[in-house]
């Protein structure tokens, strides 16, 4: 009789051991980092062109590629105006276009109006038709390269932003 109990206990221990081993193997997976987690999505200056035109690379996020590209254009303009561009080729970085806080508030409203009315296309132009986008489970991130005409933008800003 003792041997029957010992056999049953041995079966129970074996089942428990395999269950514990299975949980240990499946529960200890290390999440792999995606390449996009290592990439810097900072706006950067690509080239300082002639006649006051700056070529800038920026990233934006959205639910789809179209929205992400539009947000990347907005980000390029915001960083150009309010943050300044520090990353990029040598001799291509520059300080913020608008530094006064009161003017920044007024300019922010103007920038919103620019994108609502699509008037921003008068000051910036997307370079080429190619773009890079990365889709993850939450959203899409897209890169756009734009040329910003600083002379036209300066005229537009200072005429409309007091």
Image (spheres, helix red, strand yellow):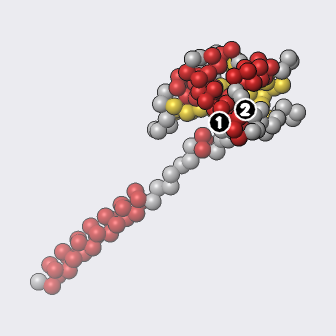
SS of the residue under disc 1 = helix
Q: Are marks 2 and 1 in contact (CB under 8 Å)?
A: no
Question: Can residue 144 be seen?
Answer: yes
- Give the camera-side residue of 100 and 22: 100
Q: Which residue was labeled with disc 2? A: 81
Name the residue at 31% across, 64% down: 19
What residue lies at 60% left-to-right and 44% top-to-bottom? 37
Residue 144: image location, x then y, percent: 65, 25
Q: Residue furthest front?
A: 162
Q: Is residue 135 left or right of residue 97?
A: left
Tell me residue 95's x, y (percent).
Answer: 81, 37
Residue 75 seen from this side: no
Q: Quadrant of residue 84?
A: top right
Is residue 11 found left or right of 37 in the rendered image? left
Residue 15 picture quarter: bottom left
- Of mark 2 and mark 1, the one earlier in the sequence is 2
Comparing 111 with 90, the one in front is: 111
Q: Residue at x 47, y 30 (%)?
A: 63
Q: Residue furthest bottom?
A: 2
Does 94 sit above or below residue 48? below
Which quadrant of the rendered structure holds the C terminus? top right
Residue 85 at x, y percent in the picture: 76, 36
* Relative height, residue 129 to residue 5 (above, below): above
Whole-Å distance between the Cαs marked 2 and 1?
Answer: 12 Å
Q: Residue at x 50, y 55 (%)?
A: 30
Q: Within 10 angstroms of label 2, few (less than 14), some, or many (20 or more) residues?
A: many
- What residue would you read off at disc 1? 105
């Amino acid at each position: 009789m003792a041997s029957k109990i010992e056999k049953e206990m041995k079966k129970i221990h074996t089942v428990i051991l395999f269950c514990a081993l299975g949980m240990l193997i499946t529960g200890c997976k290390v999440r792999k980092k995606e390449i996009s987690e290592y990439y810097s999505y900072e706006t950067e200056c690509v080239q300082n062109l002639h006649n006051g035109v700056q070529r800038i690379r920026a990233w934006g996020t959205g639910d789809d590629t179209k929205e992400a590209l539009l947000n990347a254009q907005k980000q390029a303009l915001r960083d150009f105006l309010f943050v300044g561009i520090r990353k990029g080729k040598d001799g291509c970085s520059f300080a913020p276009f608008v530094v006064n806080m009161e003017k920044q508030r007024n300019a922010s409203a103007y920038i919103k109006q620019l994108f609502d009315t699509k008037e921003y296309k008068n000051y910036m132009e997307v370079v080429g038709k190619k773009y890079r986008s990365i889709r993850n489970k939450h959203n899409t991130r897209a890169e756009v390269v734009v040329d910003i005409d600083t002379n036209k933008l300066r005229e537009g800003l200072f005429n409309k932003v007091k």
